Amino acid sequence: MSNLARRIITGLLFLPVILPLLYVTPLWTFTLFGALIVGLGAWEFFTLSHGDDRVGRAAGTVLSLLFYFVVWYTRFGQVHGGLFAAAMMAVVPVALLFSLTRPSRIPNALVETGALALGPFYVGGLMGCIGAMHDLGTHAQGAGLVVMTLMIAWFGDTGAMAFGKNLGGPKLYPAVSPNKTWSGSLGGLLGSVLGVVFAHFVYLPAVSLERGIPLAIVAGSVGQLGDLCESVLKRSAGVKDSGGLLPGHGGILDRIDALTFTAGVVYLALRTGWITLS
């Protein structure tokens, strides 16, 4: 079975889990599912930075989960702004103080402390955008926004692989990801646009094509940059995939690398009024 086929099958298997959590069950159930994804993704992230240091990986994962829940609860400071500001300011001192308690890790302190400060924002904060947008508009609209965001990221990923494999051509950024091509990048953008068009006509008509298509292009482009950013981290750690949990995808972090950046753009578009639900 080709890698593309495995990716599609794995994605389809997620639908019976994600859609009921979004549309049928209460909001908190999807929030807990998001926490599971954040926890697994954070563990993989801190495996890249902390290697065999299970205590450090656990500390980073806990920080990421805490920040995820703060983001979801405060909607990035839209409510309970003081709590969000305090959490923002606490992440770096906590990371530094944690390194101070572990003198045996001093040779790795700079890299590990940097990862502890970055990870909660990267994994917990950006994934918190998805939980935050789920609470916007009606229950169906919030669920639709999440599905649209997933489709921008994942249709883009599938389109990029399909175009890149079949068309080939000049490499996009060979120093970071030798297999990615400019044709794949174009296919990814077309896939992201298709995701928004599908959303408009099938389940989220409130998002107009006039605003949705430019959003898909911007969010899809930024999502591709997120993919490349994670590739830099993996190359630095000397690994091909962040994990092996998902067939055809690698690890959870490999699956959400574009989604984290895409979710940030979509949430920003909602908060600035570029996308409205009226």
Image (cartoon, rainbow, N blue to C red):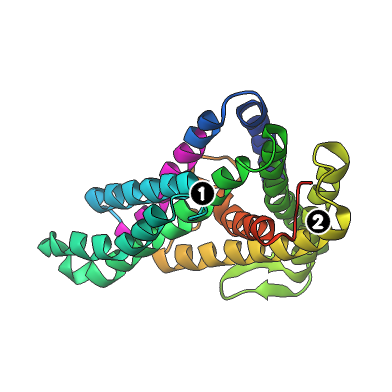
Residue 62 belongs to the span the image colors magenta: no
Instruction: Tell me what residue is drawn at x 62 percent, y 67 percent.
Output: 225
Q: Where is residue 172 in the image (x, y as percent from the top left)?
A: 69, 73
Q: Which of 57 and 118 is in front in this view?
A: 118
Per the image, label 1 sits on a secondary structure element best described as helix
Horizontal side, residue 150 vs residue 233: left or right:
right
CB atoms at circles 1 and 2 under 8 Å apart?
Answer: no
Q: Which of 150 and 253 is in front in this view?
A: 150
Horizontal side, residue 251 vs residue 159: left or right:
left
Res. 212 mark: 2
Q: In which quarter of the image is residue 148?
A: top right
Q: Where is residue 58 in the image (x, y as percent from the top left)?
A: 29, 47
Three-letter amino acid code at disc 2? Gly
Res. 128 mark: 1
Three-letter amino acid code at disc 1? Gly
Residue 46 belongs to the span the image colors magenta: yes
Q: Can residue 129 be seen by looking at this rendering?
A: yes
Question: Between disc 1 and disc 2, whose residue precedes?
Answer: 1
Instruction: Tell me what residue is drawn at x 30 percent, y 60 percent.
Output: 90
Instruction: Tell me what residue is drawn at x 59 percent, y 24 percent.
Output: 25
Q: Quadrant of the N terminus?
A: top right
Q: Can residue 251 be seen by looking at this rendering?
A: no
Q: Position of residue 233 (x, y in %)?
A: 46, 65
User: With respect to residue 24, does 187 lie above or below?
Assistant: below
Give neighbour class at mark 1: few <14, some 14-19, many 20+ (Cα, 10 Å): many
- Magenta extent: 33-50
